[in-house]
């Protein structure tokens, strides 16, 4: 859901971004039917989504790596410890970005991510429990709806920070 929503929020912003998602657990197939439905309610088409597993190559290629949960973030860092300066929990990136400031015109996205990482109070990736976004898999439909609402807000704020108008 986060990938699709971030892509939508970046669509009309001044940035040429590739947004991809990958899972830290083996999951082969399409998006969960409840995720497809809650995003359809928001006007976002998730029917063509195909999951993929996280790889070291995906981490290495990414300018910024976003995770919903600390376990996901730790999985990213297991693939590439050096990604610590560009790997964040979604709400963590918003919190740090709103404190440090949006990416400047002409500023490389990786450099901006390093500025955010430098603003971490302890200097380490890992996130706070309150920065996690609950994974609704296995939960009732209303939990999917609540997660979609939170992701919509967070990804809109991320888009505004990474590609200000």
Image (cartoon, rainbow, N blue to C red):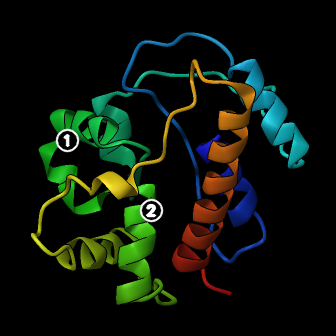
* Residue situated in front as seen by the camera: 35 or 140: 140
Q: Residue at x 38, y 57 (%)?
A: 131
Q: Secondary structure at mark 2?
A: helix
**Residue 112, picture quadrant:** bottom left
Q: Is residue 100 left or right of residue 45?
A: left
Residue identifier under label 1? 77
Q: Is residue 101 visible?
A: yes
Residue 91 image label? 2
Residue 163 in percent (x, y) is at: 59, 77
Q: Specify the quadrant of the image occupied by residue 39.
A: top right
Q: Position of residue 68 (x, y in %)?
A: 44, 44
Crowding near the residue tagged with mark 1, few <14, some 14–19, many ≥20 C-alpha atoms within 10 Å:
some
Q: Residue at x 33, y 36 (%)?
A: 72
Q: Report the number of numbered marks.
A: 2
Q: Quadrant of the N terminus?
A: top right
Q: Is residue 6 above or below residue 137?
A: below
Report the side of 45 relative to 106 (left or right).
right
2 or 1: mark nearer the eye: 2
Q: Position of residue 45 (x, y in %)?
A: 84, 38
In the image, is residue 81 above or below residue 96?
Answer: above
Q: CA distance from mark 2 to mark 1?
A: 18 Å
Q: Nearer the viewer, residue 98 or 116?
A: 98
Q: Would residue 40 be found to the left or right of residue 136 on screen? A: right
């Amino acid at each position: 859901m986060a990938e699709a929503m971030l892509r939508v929020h970046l669509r009309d912003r001044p940035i040429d971004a590739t947004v991809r998602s990958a899972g830290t657990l083996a999951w082969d197939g399409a998006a969960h039917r409840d995720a497809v439905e809650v995003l359809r309610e928001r006007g976002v088409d998730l029917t063509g989504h195909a999951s993929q597993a996280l790889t070291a190559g995906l981490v290495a290629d990414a300018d910024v790596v976003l995770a919903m949960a600390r376990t996901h973030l730790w999985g990213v860092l297991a693939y590439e410890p050096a990604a610590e300066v560009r790997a964040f929990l979604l709400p963590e990136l918003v919190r740090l970005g709103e404190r440090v400031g949006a990416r400047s015109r002409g500023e490389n996205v990786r450099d901006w991510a390093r500025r955010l990482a430098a603003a971490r109070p302890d200097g380490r990736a890992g996130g706070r429990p309150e920065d996690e976004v609950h994974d609704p898999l296995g939960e009732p439909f209303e939990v999917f709806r609540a997660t979609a609402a939170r992701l919509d807000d967070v990804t809109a704020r991320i888009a505004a920070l990474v590609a200000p108008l």
